[in-house]
Image (tube, rainbow, N blue to C red):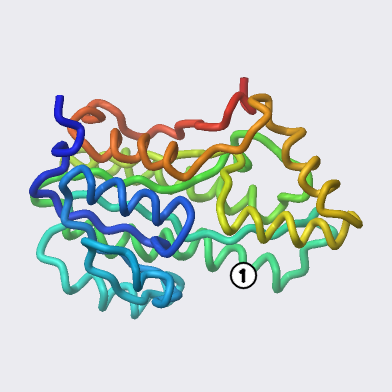
Amino acid sequence: MDLTNRLSGKVAVVTAAGQGIGRAIAERLVAEGAEVHASDINAALLEDLTSTVTAALDATDASAVDAYFAGFDRIDVLVHGVGYVHQGTIEECTLEDWRRSCSITLDSAFNVLGAAIPKMKDHGGSIVTIGSVASSIKGFPKRAAYGATKGGVIGLTKSVAADYLPFGIRCNSICPGTVDSPSLRGRIDDLADQMGSHDAAMKFFIDRQPARRFGTPDEIAGLCAFLASADGAFVTGQAINIDGGITI
């Protein structure tokens, strides 16, 4: 099987594509033959993303999202990865932190999926959300707001899968463990300030990894490409853990 041609002729839209997991997914879908439209709130991060149509997009802005998706005649693949990681217990999470987490992670999913689905109903397609094992799947220390909002993303994913299967639309959530990315490195630096050293912060993250390493964005992208392609045609409504053994 030619794995570089599974998405030939397909139109794919990837949010949060500027770096990390989103960027790896955009690049993988291009390699698989898709026409990829990549967006990010920070347009500068998209400048060197080749073979894609790029756009700045604040996925928390419903009007901006509607205007962006109005430009598509059809969409075959949607990958939504916008999210925000707040570090803290519920006592360390202010109402402002909570509302920011809900806006970026959960409201953005509502906006993007709601705007994209009408572009998929006539012919079907695949939607992939980026969830997390830190969600309704498993509780983690200092992830009160993050776990709650990612749990909401999984719930929305399952609801969309149930509602739109008659239209040939599949919807699944990829739930990574800890993945090496610019976002993770930023969280390690933030935690190092709280814990007193970079080594202590790194140990905090590594200790919860049974595989004793972080995942890679490319590993997440490979699973996403499977779900986007005909190889994943019988998979819908699933929260798929890719976590190096965290949830064994």
Which residue is at a point 75% across and 60% down the rendered structure image?
Answer: 189
Outermost residue, right direction? Answer: 196
* Residue 62 position within the rendered picture, expressed as x and y whole percent measured from the top left: 38, 75
* Residue placed under numbered mark 1 in the picture: 100
Name above or below for residue 183 compared with residue 204. Answer: below
Picture quarter with the C terminus? top right
* Residue 2 position within the rendered picture, expressed as x and y whole percent measured from the top left: 15, 30
Which residue is at a point 73% across and 37% down the rendered structure image?
Answer: 206
Name above or below for residue 106 compared with residue 1. Answer: below
Picture quarter with the N terminus? top left
* Residue 98 position within the rendered picture, expressed as x and y whole percent measured from the top left: 68, 65
Indicate left or right for 35 with 212 as reference: left
Indicate left or right for 30 with 129 as reference: left
> Which image quadrant is residue 178 in?
top right
Name above or below for residue 193 compared with residue 62. Answer: above
For disc 1, the neighbor class at 10 Å (few under 14, some 14 to 19, many from 20) is some
* Residue 200 position within the rendered picture, expressed as x and y whole percent measured from the top left: 85, 46
Which residue is at a point 36% across and 36% down the rendered structure image?
Answer: 222
As rendered, which of 20 and 146 lies closer to the eye? 20
**Mark 1: amino acid:** Arg
Number of disc labels: 1
Which residue is at a point 73% across and 42% down the rendered structure image?
Answer: 205
> Which image quadrant is residue 119 in?
bottom left
Q: Secondary structure at mark 1?
A: helix
As rendered, which of 76 and 36 lies closer to the eye? 36
